[in-house]
Amino acid sequence: CVGCVWVSACRVSALNKSGSLRTPATLNHLRMVDASGRLVMQYLIYVSRYHMLNQFESIEMCKLVFGSNGLNSGLLSEFTPLTEPLLFFKSLMNEDKITFSDELGDLLLSHSDDKKLALSVFSKCSPPNPTKILQTLIEIGDFSLVSQFIKEHQASDWPTITTDIRSLLNSLLIRQTH
């Protein structure tokens, strides 16, 4: 069966110890074979059973789990008992199966209603991006945490942070007036 060959290829790629097969090209090949996302999801589930997802895989998992293509919970139910996208993604994070990046945090901000999840990603990036953390704290609206964050990061790039604060507050004011 043709599908079985691709499932086997997913297993081989996922179990490859060197990680040399775990590339954006592999994800693109799987997407070309199966536009529904099922094959990519199967691949990512296999990888996550044995390894931490790399940056590209983590971003792809986020896109599939929270994506607007309507696959999220239906697709999840085929592979995991956790069919609620937010719970599933949090479980991957708690199991140290996700590689954190600014791009992943940005995706979570735009695709998930849980801004604290994006904040957690931004905070765990290496190195953390103070601007992204500050922006998310402001969007969450917890100004005591904003104040605490600013006090803790006074020694860092203060002129950039104050400029960022001004632009973030201006953008929030513009959004509220429309």
Image (cartoon, helix red, strand yellow):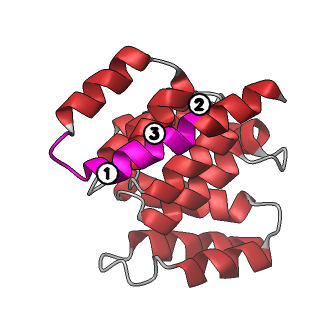
Q: Residues within 10 Å of mark 2 (few under 14, many from 20)?
A: some
Please tell me which residue lies in front, 84 or 56.
56
Q: N-terminal of the two: label 2 or label 3?
A: 2
User: Which residue lies at the image location 39% right of the left edge and 36% below the top edge?
Assistant: 120
* Amino acid type for the residue under numbered disc 2: Leu
* Amino acid type for the residue under numbered disc 1: Pro
Screen quadrant of the N terminus: bottom right
Task: Return the residue at label 3.
Answer: 165
Q: Kindly state the secondary structure of the residue where label 2 is placed.
A: helix
Could you tell me if residue 133 is visible in this image?
Answer: yes
**Where residue 121 sits: x, y (%)?**
41, 43
Q: N-terminal of the two: label 1 or label 2?
A: 2
* Amino acid type for the residue under numbered disc 3: Ile
Could you tell me if residue 129 is visible in this image?
Answer: no
Q: Kindly state the secondary structure of the residue where label 1 is placed.
A: helix
Task: Return the residue at label 1.
Answer: 159
User: Which residue lies at the image location 81% right of the left edge and 46% below the top edge?
Assistant: 68
Screen quadrant of the C terminus: top right
Between label 2 and label 3, give the one nearer the viewer: 3
Q: N-terminal of the two: label 3 or label 1?
A: 1
Residue found at the far left of this picture:
155
Q: What is the span of residues highlighted in magenta in the rendered image?
A: 154-169
Q: Residues within 10 Å of mark 3 (few under 14, many from 20)?
A: some
Task: Return the residue at label 2.
Answer: 86
User: Which residue lies at the image location 51% right of the left edge and 63% below the top edge?
Assistant: 57
Q: Residues within 10 Å of mark 1 (few under 14, many from 20)?
A: few
Corner quadrant of residue 2:
bottom right
Question: What distance separates the C-alpha of mark 3 from that of mark 1?
Answer: 10 Å
Question: What distance separates the C-alpha of mark 1 from that of mark 2?
Answer: 36 Å
Q: Is residue 93 magenta?
A: no
